[in-house]
Image: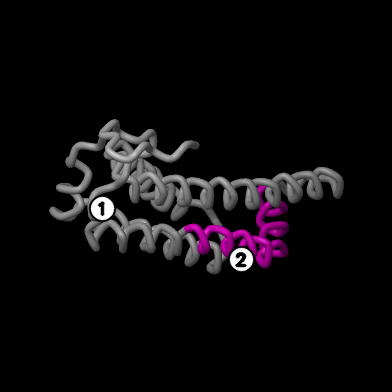
Amino acid sequence: MYQRFPGDNAPSSEPIPANIPQSVLRAVRVMYIGLAASLLGIVVDLTTLSSTRSQILSRNPTYTATQLNNAEHAEIGLFIAGGLIGAALWLWMAQKCRAGKSWARITSTVFFGIDTVSQIVSLRVESGAATRFYGLLIWLIGLVAIILLWQRSSSDYFRAPRY
């Protein structure tokens, strides 16, 4: 990209965010913690494989050894994919919220709502204590981020025009 000519008043192609309020900066930091927690959550999920295998077997007692292994491998794939997708969403929302994109604050809130429903549904599903605790921890991180994103100073920042 070329440097602007001195005295050129044309807007640059990259918007420069206004002074970012502390509430948004804190929310972004919390989102980065959520990103790290999502990646660490993959490890937590993988440490519960023995209980995952026994849960699959208790739900499907007629499974052969091959079917049980295939179901376990599919579960491992879902653990890893879910953690990576979650981490990518945390990163994406953190970057866009820091840039002052109002749609990102709304999208973050929708993702938090989806996670809330997921946590409620997971109460009915048999899972290990570590996995359930970790899911609650990530939900709490999301709650803190959403509270920070919807404070008055944050709202003023997201409403400010971008050039």
Q: Percent x, y for residue 112?
A: 36, 48
Note whether 12 is above or below 94 in the view shown.
Answer: above
Left or right: 9 as drawn, with respect to 89: left
Circle 1 — which element? helix
Q: Main secondary structure of the magenta part?
A: helix
Q: For the point 70% across and 52% down, which residue is it?
A: 76
Note whether 1 is above or below 155 in the view shown.
Answer: above
Task: Give the residue number, with chain letter if any, for mark 2.
Answer: 44
Q: Percent x, y for residue 74?
A: 72, 44
First in sequence: mark 2 vs mark 1 = 2
Is 127 or 131 nearer to us in this picture? Answer: 131
Based on the picture, tell me whether residue 116 belongs to the magenta stretch: no
Q: Quadrant of the C terminus?
A: top left
Q: Amino acid type of disc 1? A: Leu
Q: Residue furthest top?
A: 10
Circle 2 — which element? helix
Viewer-nearest of discs 2 and 1: 1
Q: For the point 47% across and 59% down, which residue is it?
A: 135
Q: Percent x, y for residue 149?
A: 25, 53
Task: Give the residue number, with chain letter if any, for mark 1.
Answer: 149
Q: Amino acid type of disc 2? A: Val
Magenta segment boundaries in residue numbering: 35-59
Is 134 or 59 nearer to us in this picture? Answer: 134
Please tell me in which quadrant of the rendered image residue 142 appears: bottom left
Please tell me in which quadrant of the rendered image residue 103 appears: top left
Colouring of the image: one colour
Based on the picture, tell me whether residue 52 belongs to the magenta stretch: yes
Q: For the point 63% across and 52% down, which residue is it?
A: 79
